Amino acid sequence: MSSPQDSRKPLTQAIIPRAPHVPVRARIVKRMTRRMAAKLPVRLVMPDGSWMGRYRDAPALRLHRPEAFYHRLGGAGLIGFGEAYQAGDFDSDDLPGLLSVLAAGWDELIPPAVQGIRSLYGSAMPSSHSNSADNAVRNISHHYDLSNELFSLFLDETMTYSSALFAGGSTQWSDVADAQRRKVDRLLDRCGVTDGSRVLEIGSGWGELSVRAARRGAHVDTITLSQQQLERVKKRAAELDLGDRINARLQDYRSLDLAERYDAIISVEMIEAVGEEYWSRYFGVLDQLLRPGGRIGLQSITMRHDLMVEARGAYTWIHKYIFPGGLIPSVHAIEQCLRASTGLRVVDRLAFGSDYAHTLRLWRERFLDNRNALERLGFDELFARTWEFYLAYSQAGFSGGHLDVNQFILEHRS
């Protein structure tokens, strides 16, 4: 197995392209940037400390290299905006707040004459990002096999990398582990997992759900495409003397034995990586593997259906640097796919997007607190800025209501 540092070689300065030379588009972006300061609650701070804007306490977009910033956005649009942060062309004293304001006011900033410039919104998804069986392994490994030590820097003791479910309005770091267990237990409870249940988990994470199911007396088959996650799950099961109840495998959902039957099937925030062209097959596999009377627990990030339709096929900064391939579904798309391709129906749904905003805020704060440890693990400054932007970008999506997260409980239609 390669060392953690070897697995991170692609994350170097070389992956950020030089700011292109696009003078006409750069002038348009410069006007848009000044328009932003005039119209939105944002302070535009120039390298000499002077600033523009209507609100002294608004989130700042602090330009260090204005010309590079204008040319990056002019050449690559929203991908260029993320790359400008990665490269250090700008900073912000409140990055999630800045991104929330820009997301809410983006359409207002673009002059009608340039609405048709596709690069302002993003380019088409490369075919190499399709989540075919071969590509899916590479896409998952790109993110989840960076190193378990990296994720331990900002995740809680349960190593759960999905939205927590808070209770009673308490959203401090000390609450996160309990909130993650509450999320897992709700899925297990709604799916009726108890002593003797046969459970399939699609997307193992680092093992918290399979451990909690096994402690109830269930027998769990858990599959993942991440080698590092697999090793962690197996190690944890052995340490807790649960190896006879947890069968962890490196396996694609498409290669599961369809003759098997499970009392419960649970998949937490994995469908986002499936890809729209494979949603029908994914749900079809779940449908076939679920025994009569059984239940499926699906947790998914979701977006409004109109936004999902707009995002379909687009290539974004998140695709390029964080999660290759995939698409966040809408609630409507999930329900439509279930009706068209399966005999399953939704019998229970819980939306808790504000909890994800809190979860991401706490992850980002802890990531920043432990930033000095990144160098010790072999990660460079570019990687740190990339993940700062990713966590802030995600937090802004949930706090602004552009994204949500839902737990769906499914069963066969009678």
Image (cartoon, grey):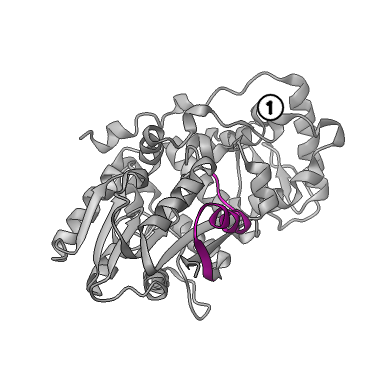
Look at 30% across and 64% down and name the residue there. 199
Does residue 162 lie above or below 320 as drawn?
A: below
Can you tell which quarter of the image residue 178 is in? bottom left
Task: Tell me if 378 is positioned left or right of 102 in this view.
Answer: left
Quadrant position of the N terminus in the picture: top left
Q: Can residue 395 be seen in this snapshot?
A: no
- In the depicted view, which residue is nearer to us: 143 or 257? 257
Across and down, in percent, residue 181 comes to 36, 71
Can you tell which quarter of the image residue 236 is in? bottom left
Residue 411 inside the magenta-drawn segment:
no
- In the depicted view, which residue is nearer to us: 86 or 403? 403
Across and down, in percent, residue 410 comes to 47, 66
Magenta residues (range): 327-348
Could you say whether the residue bearing mark 1 is in a helix, strand or loop?
helix
Numbered-mark total: 1
Callout 1 crowding tier (Cα within 10 Å): few <14, some 14–19, many ≥20:
some
Look at 49% across and 40% down and name the residue there. 386
**Residue wearing tag 1:** 67
